[in-house]
Image: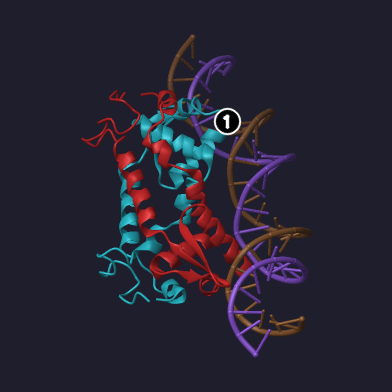
Chain colours: A red, B cyan, C purple, D brown
Amino acid sequence: MSPRQAAASPGPVDALLLPEFFKALSDPTRVRLVACMIKCGRACTVSEVADCCSVDFSVVSRHLAMLEQSGLLTAEKKGRSVHYAARHQHLSGMLRALADAIDACNPEDPSCCGGACGCGTDKT
Amino acid sequence: MSPRQAAASPGPVDALLLPEFFKALSDPTRVRLVACMIKCGRACTVSEVADCCSVDFSVVSRHLAMLEQSGLLTAEKKGRSVHYAARHQHLSGMLRALADAIDACNPEDPSCCGGACGCGTDKT
DNA sequence: GATATACTTGCATGATGACGCAAACAAACA
DNA sequence: TGTTTGTTTGCGTCATCATGCAAGTATATC
C-alpha cells in the first residue's frame, strides 16, 4: 500500500504510538527517574527520588508529576509526603502491545496482515 | 531497595531506556511519519511520505533523516530518490526487550528479581 | 550542456521545555 | 500557635527544536 493509503487507514499502531507517552521518556533526567523507580520496585517519596538525581528538588517534583500525568507512574498522597511508584505492568503491557502491532505490519513476518493492522493484505 | 541504590546499580532497563530513541517518537509529525511507514510495509521515497503529511517537504526530509539516525528507519539511495523503510523487527524487538526488563523488576510479578534486573532480591 | 526531478541544507523565527531560585502551600509536631 | 518537614508553584532564563522558505546538490532526461 502507498504511504498515503497507510496514513488514511488507522490501526492499532496509531492507537499505541502516542507522542505524549514517548515525550515523557525523551528527557535524560526523566528517564533516569523512571529507570530508578522501575528498578526500585516500590513506592518512593519525592525526596527519596531526588536523592538519586543531581537536579534541583523542584525539577524532580515537576518531572514526577509529569510522569504520573503521562501514565508511567502512580501517585498517592500520604500525610505530607507523596508516594510515587512505577506502573510496571502497565508499561510492559503497552510496549508489548505496540510490538505486536508493529509485527503485524511486517511483510517479512509470516503472521503479517492477518487483520491486526490497518494495512490490509496488499503488500505493494 | 532505595532509589539511590537503584540508581547506582545499572541493569537492562538502563541499557534499553534510551532518551534518543524515545525522543524520535516524541513529536506528532514524526510519529505520523513512522506510523505511516510501519503500516505501509514497504520502502518509500521522501516524496511519497511527504504526501501523507501537511508539513513542508523539507521538514519531512529532515524528520526521516533523524528517524534513520535514531535507528527507526533504514535509508537506501537509489538513483535520485531515497528509499526509507521501517525497521519492524528491530523496533518490536527493542520494545519487547524493554518490556521484559521492566517485568523483571516488578515485585508483583512472581518471576521478578531472578537476576534479570539490577535490583537484587531485596524488595524493600 | 541544459533542464527537470528528488532531495538536502542554511537561515530566521516562533514555540516549547528544562532548569534553578524563591515563595507558597500543606501537614505534622512542639 | 509557631515551627519544621515535604512538596508544589510562579517566574525568569537559556537551550533546544519544529517549521517554512530559499538556495544548493545530485542524478536522470532531453
For the question of whether residue A71 can be seen, the reply is: yes
Q: What is the quadrant of the N terminus of chain A in the image?
A: top left
The percent coordinates of residue B107 (x first, y second) are 33, 67
Residue A113 appears left or right of B6 = left
Residue ID for mark 1: B55
Q: How many marks?
A: 1
In the depicted view, which residue is nearer to us: C12 or B9? Answer: B9
Q: What is the quadrant of the C terminus of chain A in the image?
A: top left
Q: Which quadrant of the structure image shows residue B40?
A: top left
Q: Which residue is drawn at 50% across and 24% down?
A: B51
In the depicted view, which residue is nearer to us: A73 or A34? Answer: A73
Residue B38 appears left or right of B22 = left
The percent coordinates of residue B64 (x first, y second) are 48, 38
Considering only vertical position in the picture, is A50 above or below A98? below
Q: Which residue lies furthest to the left in this view?
A: A110
The percent coordinates of residue D29 (x first, y second) are 45, 14
Considering only vertical position in the picture, is B31 above or below A46? above
In the depicted view, which residue is nearer to us: A26 or B85? Answer: A26
In the depicted view, which residue is nearer to us: B93 or A15? Answer: A15
For mark 1, name the chain: B
Q: At numbered mark 1, what does the secondary structure look like: helix, strand or loop?
A: loop
Considering only vertical position in the picture, is A56 above or below B28? below
Residue D26 appears left or right of B89 = right
For the question of whether residue A26 can be seen, the reply is: no
The residue under label 1 is which amino acid type?
Answer: Val
Q: Which residue is drawn at 24% across and 37% down?
A: A109
Q: How crowded is mark 1: few (under 14 residues within 10 Å), some or many (20 or more)?
A: few
Q: Residue at x 39, y 24 (%)?
A: A2
The percent coordinates of residue C2 (x first, y second) are 59, 15
